[in-house]
Amino acid sequence: MAVKESSERDPLLEEALGHSGPIVVFDKVHLAFDEKVILRDVSFTLQTGHTKIFLGASGAGKSTILRLMLGLLKPDAGEIFVNGERVDNMSEDALMAVRADLGMVFQEGALFDSLTVRENVGYKLFEELHWPLDRANARVEEVLGFIGLGEFIDRMPSELSGGQRRRVAIARAMAAKPRILLYDEPTTGLDPITALTVDEEIIKLRDLEGVSSILVTHQLRDAFFVAENTARRDGQKVVFERAEGRKADEAEFIMLKDGRIGFEGNASELREIAARDPYIHAFLS
Amino acid sequence: MIKNVLRGLVMPPFYFRDIVEQFEAIGVGSLTVVLLTGMFTGMVLALQSGFTLDQFGARSMVGRLVSASMVKELGPVLTGLMVAGRVGSGIAAELGSMTVTDQIAALRALGTDPIRKLVLPRILAGVVMVPLLTVISGGVGMVGGWIVTVTQLKVASSVYWNAVVQGLFIQDVWMGLIKPFFLGFAIVSIGCHVGMRTTGGTQGVGRATTNAVVASSVAVIAVDFLVTKILIVLMY
């Protein structure tokens, strides 16, 4: 597909691409696997420092959106921009540069099971960015300290619990300081206490490190916790409190249904519409 | 995949540590099985051919038969089959597990091209180490043949080694060295290809492993025939 000239683009898309800083734009993205249509004309924009939370039934195309963003999949139609770069028609080599600013937390963690926690977390620093060893090790220790797993640095992934693996995956995704983090069902299969720890890491990264986040989940409790809470430093401690006003609007929900966006709005709007929309009501209840 | 492998050969980044690791895993790791196979094949070859040649009063020719068979055919093919069983299956299982657990996707997300990081080192190790293993297999095969010839067939050592040298022509040696390059490439690229295309969870990994062993074993025999035919036309 030929790249559209600037004058041919939708004014809204043009405006979205005009902003500086990390941003993700999906413009009328369509994707089908054989006969099954996964995404139909999906459009949305992620602003710097904001959070998008994708909800939807299993197979609704939530994880597919993250893979499209990373260029792991190519759409059949539509345009995808990450940090102003169009990624949907990019070569694998060119995508490597775009991926430098993206961190992805895969379902189940996808840790490299032949590497230690240190090597997993520092993978990009050691292998791709070729940081000096002492600087890379210091960063690995810093991020593992951030997620509270400093003492597990020399363990193998097989020696960790499910929640610890998920948190190490978050540490790996954030180690190279990407400005956009993508979470693919980071709390699925975890007990509520561990899931809450993972949610807090997501909030901390967003509010203390200024990372823009896209969260795919069907765990409503976690989705609302991430959307409705904020983190701030209070001396050495990190305090979590309820997000109010403009901060509360920075986390938006997108509900996918039959490949389309069925709803887009903040947490309170989602609760309001649930009263009128039977599908969303059923989903939320 | 082959196009990307060739590109990875000449353009950075290069993952030297992975290349060394794969040389060790594929080459050194396969040494025991190749040594045993080569040794016993040489021994049984001497035993069988000794009794057959006896009927013509040509027991002293055992060395010729062992060396020609081991260097031209049995060395490359048996080493290829052993490596297909050990390495082809291992690669398919490892890469297959990495694919179904999203580790390959994670590699790409972290900015690493899995072809350069995983496939290229394995293919390099395959094309370098399978010929080396074949030479070793042929060597120990001849030693095995010597043990049986001297102890069982009661032929003098010097007679055996003389026959070994007489049985070999330079074209045979070239054939024995060239064929394993192609066999190594076929085994490892099939293992990588099947592994990277694995779907269907752990069951899929099992299926991929079986498919890789079957396909690479058949490929060893088929590639051996094709390359032999081409080399005969070119060299003899």
Image: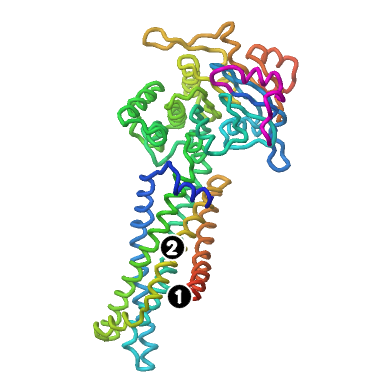
Range of residues picked out in magenta: A1-23
Label drawn at residue B181: 2
Give x and y (percent) for residue A15.
Answer: 65, 17
Determine if residue A225 is in view. no
The residue lying at 40 percent from left, 75 percent from top is: B172
Q: Amino acid at mark 2?
A: Phe
Residue at mark 1: chain: B
Determine the CA span between mark 1 and mark 2. 17 Å
Give x and y (percent) for residue A201.
Answer: 46, 20
User: What residue would you read off at disc 1?
Assistant: B235
The residue lying at 53 percent from left, 12 percent from top is: A229
Circle 2: is it few (<14), some (14-19), or many (20+) Cα within 10 Å? many
Question: Image quarter for residue A139?
Answer: top left
Tally of numbered discs: 2
Q: Amino acid at mark 1?
A: Met
B87 shown above or below B8: below
The residue lying at 53 percent from left, 50 percent from top is: B3
Is circle 1 on the same chain as circle 2? yes
